[in-house]
Image (spheres, grey):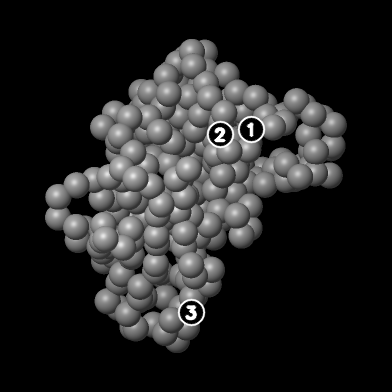
Amino acid sequence: AQSVTQPDIHITVSEGASLELRCNYSYGATPYLFWYVQSPGQGLQLLLKYFSGDTLVQGIKGFEAEFKRSQSSFNLRKPSVHWSDAAEYFCAVGYSGNTPLVFGKGTRLSVIA
Amino acid sequence: IAGITQAPTSQILAAGRRMTLRCTQDMRHNAMYWYRQDLGLGLRLIHYSNTAGTTGKGEVPDGYSVSRANTDDFPLTLASAVPSQTSVYFCASRGQGGLGYTFGSGTRLTVV
């Protein structure tokens, strides 16, 4: 069965510091990969997605992610974190057709001054 | 504005009562999904529908039922609510081509 692992439950970074959130997936086929962000009390917003092609994808709010097939990873990065980036981040994996997305358990990001 | 509407926004429900969470989308997406979100567990799939007239079970379907009479609506019913169904419920839809989901704003349900 496909699965998504986000090893870090909670990360705290200083404002202006760089950020990397980890995501590993388990599946045999080439996946579609997603990162979503959820602010407190809100729904989920798509940050970026990878389907094929260039393994480094750019998203909204200055985020980027890199697909590494050899490591089954799709880590999310941001060079300089802003206080407004404090939120819950979810990695998800899907496949062609109508297979439902599988989500990781999420990583909560706190940003300190 | 195109998107997904969920209702109610929040609800406190007595155990044993029946409850239907509503989900309506206006994007003509074929596929729709219900997830529940619990602290430390992320989002878990309850039921899904790939197209009107079809439904399927997800990871945690027990105690829930769905119907998909048309493209736009995908209600989730709790026949007899239990406290373990206290959660935040998200409806989502997906268009053709494997694009990411569009999520509703969620329904916060408390069963007491």
- Report the chain holding disc 1: B
- Report the chain holding disc 3: A
**Residue drawn at point x = 36 percent, y = 26 percent:** B29
Can you tell which mark lies on residue B38? none
Q: How far apart are marks 1 and 2 (CA)?
A: 6 Å
Identity, as a three-letter code, of the amino acid under mark 1: Pro
Contact between labelled residues 2 and 3, with CB atoms less than 8 Å apart: no
Q: How crowded is mark 1: few (under 14 residues within 10 Å), some or many (20 or more)?
A: some
Identity, as a three-letter code, of the amino acid under mark 3: Thr
Where does residue B99 sit, x and y in percent of width and height?
30, 38
Q: Quick one: A26 or A55, which is closer to the camera?
A: A26
Front disc: 3 or 2: 2
Which residue, as the protein is rendered here, is positioned at the far left?
A54
Asked if residue B102 is positioned above or below residue A80 in the image, the reply reads: above
Where does residue A39 sit, x and y in percent of width and height?
49, 60
Identity, as a three-letter code, of the amino acid under mark 2: Gly
**Residue drawn at point x = 59 percent, y = 49 percent:** B37
Q: How far apart are marks 3 and 2 (CA)?
A: 33 Å
Contact between labelled residues 2 and 1, with CB atoms less than 8 Å apart: yes
Query: Does dot 1 land on a helix, a strand or a loop?
Result: loop
- Report the chain holding disc 2: B
Where does residue B54 sit, x and y in percent of width and height?
49, 16
Query: Does dot 2 land on a helix, a strand or a loop?
Result: loop
Answer yes or no: is residue B24 visible. Answer: no
Quadrant of res A23: bottom left
Q: Quick one: A108 or B63, which is closer to the camera?
A: B63
Asked if residue A83 is positioned above or below residue B104 in the image, the reply reads: below
For label 3, the residue is A12
For label 2, the residue is B58
Can you tell which mark lies on residue B61? 1
